[in-house]
Amino acid sequence: MATEASALDELQSELTCPVCLELFREPVILECGHHFCRQCITQCWSAKPEENPTCPQCRKTCAQKLRPNSLLCNVVDSVRRARAMDAEPTAPRERTQRPPVSGGSSELAPEPDQCEEHEEKLKLFCEDDQMAICLVCGMSRDHKTHSVIPINEAFENYKERLSAALQRVELQIEEASSSQTLTNQKMMEIKEHAGTLEDQMGREFAQLRLFLQREEEQARATLRGRKEERLQQLDETLTHTTQHISTLHTTALQLQHKLDQDDNPAQLRGIKNFISDAETLFQRPLEVSMDLQAGDFLGPLQYRLWRKMSSILNPGPAAVTLDPDTAYPRLVVSPCGTSVRVGEIQRNLPDNPERFTLYNIVLGSQAFSSGQHYWEVEVGDKTAWGLGVAAAWVNRKEEVSLCPEDGFWTVGLRSGGEYEACTSAGSALSLGSRPRRVGLFLDLSAGLLSFYDSADMSHIFTFSHIPPQPLYPYFNPWPIISGQNTEPLRVVAPRP
């Protein structure tokens, strides 16, 4: 049975009109040899009466001579009867008449899959206009030169395109979701990082506030002590004076009594000593100073506190010195080890392992291995310089990139007047003003190296994710070019 049904399906496909895509009805044959339903080919030609009739299948011009094919008609009838035996009988499809629409209108309502203009089934798809059309529309002037395909084929094609588009959209959704997740993670990291920085800043400011609070309390206590000392001295003076006034009043009464007595020779006995004692009885107390010495409490108060505050700064300015054994032979390190300048080649220097032999580099004498450190370097009016840190293992004899990959974390001014952070890709820096003194802050526990303009402590650049290891301060005064850049690099000594 399956074989018979398959054969019947194959036979039916051969007996299908290429216009209406149904079994032939009154099949006719054209001069080109193609078969069509009489009604189908007649409608196709009548839709374009001004044009020469052509075959809808091969597009060849044909005479309007339709020859019936009775043999083919008999075969079609046989197939139709065979189909009727295999299935439930269904109502015959009306090709010319449809029921009127409700409301008594004499016009026929087109079905959803029918052409509104010709009331034919939509069996074609115009790819140019992106619309379903009927067979008559397909033969019309509007669509004759367009790319027209069977509607079933259009469904298959666009389902494939829709499927491909869906896959692309799903990939975009996946990519967008991944980006969304990454963005949310970054937002959380920024919030956490900002919270950590805020806590750290809070602790730093709390230490400064505690220092200032203690200094204020101590200064106020000293002032109160000095005030109490002066008031006590004045109180003692006041008590002493009050007692003397009382004594003087008593003496005055005695003198008045002597004056009021009648003249009597007995009154003159010892009168000289009596008067002398009365006149020398009061002794003025020592003068109490009214000067609280405001200079001890005010004066350059903020400056004195700033100087005193340096003792609690963490990190405080470090006393960095240069190691002449690491200096390039053209570099001259000062005897105190705090400055370096470019000079003549010193050919008698030993080529020890620590010495740089290709670049104008000198390192600090001591490495920083832990904690936080801060130092400042005077660059003045130099037209080129480099500062930073270097790992102990850097190559000192061959060409290197002076970047983190080679163990250098540096920032510098190039001879063209451009500031640059020596990262892997190179990072050009835009500074608001030209620094004359550069501060470097190294936090080994956090893996950070930051650069600042010491004049206003404005931030220049920060290297992050520096691996924990001993790091040496790095100094590069750069060569002298056309008589310029002769100034030395000077390490700023910490204030005592």
Image (cartoon, rainbow, N blue to C red):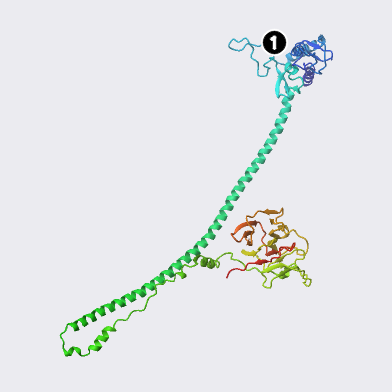
Provide residue 159's location: percent of width, then percent of height.
Answer: 71, 28
Above or below 228: residue 26: above
Asked which quadrant contains residue 23, the reply is top right
Q: Tell me the quadrant of the picture where the N terminus can be found.
A: top right
> Would you say residue 361 is visible in this rendering?
yes
The residue tagged 1 is: 96
Q: Residue, x 20% and y 90% (percent of image)?
A: 269
Q: Residue, x 64% and y 57% (percent of image)?
A: 462
> Would you say residue 370 is visible in this rendering?
no
Is residue 271 left or right of 45 when viewed as pictured?
Answer: left
Above or below 132: residue 52: above
Q: Residue, x 54% and y 60% (percent of image)?
A: 204
Find numbered disc 1 in the image and state the secondary structure of the residue it sits on: loop
Asked which quadrant contains residue 416, the reply is bottom right
Q: Nearer the viewer, residue 109 or 60?
A: 60
Provide residue 436's location: percent of width, then percent of height.
Answer: 64, 62
Q: Please rate how many residues cluster around mark 1, counting C-alpha atoms within 10 Å: few if below 14, some from 14 to 19, many from 20.
A: few
Q: Residue, x 33% and y 76% (percent of image)?
A: 237
- Residue type, numbered disc 1: Thr
Provide residue 362's location: percent of width, then percent of height.
Answer: 71, 66
Asked which quadrant contains residue 96, the reply is top right
Q: Residue furthest front?
A: 263
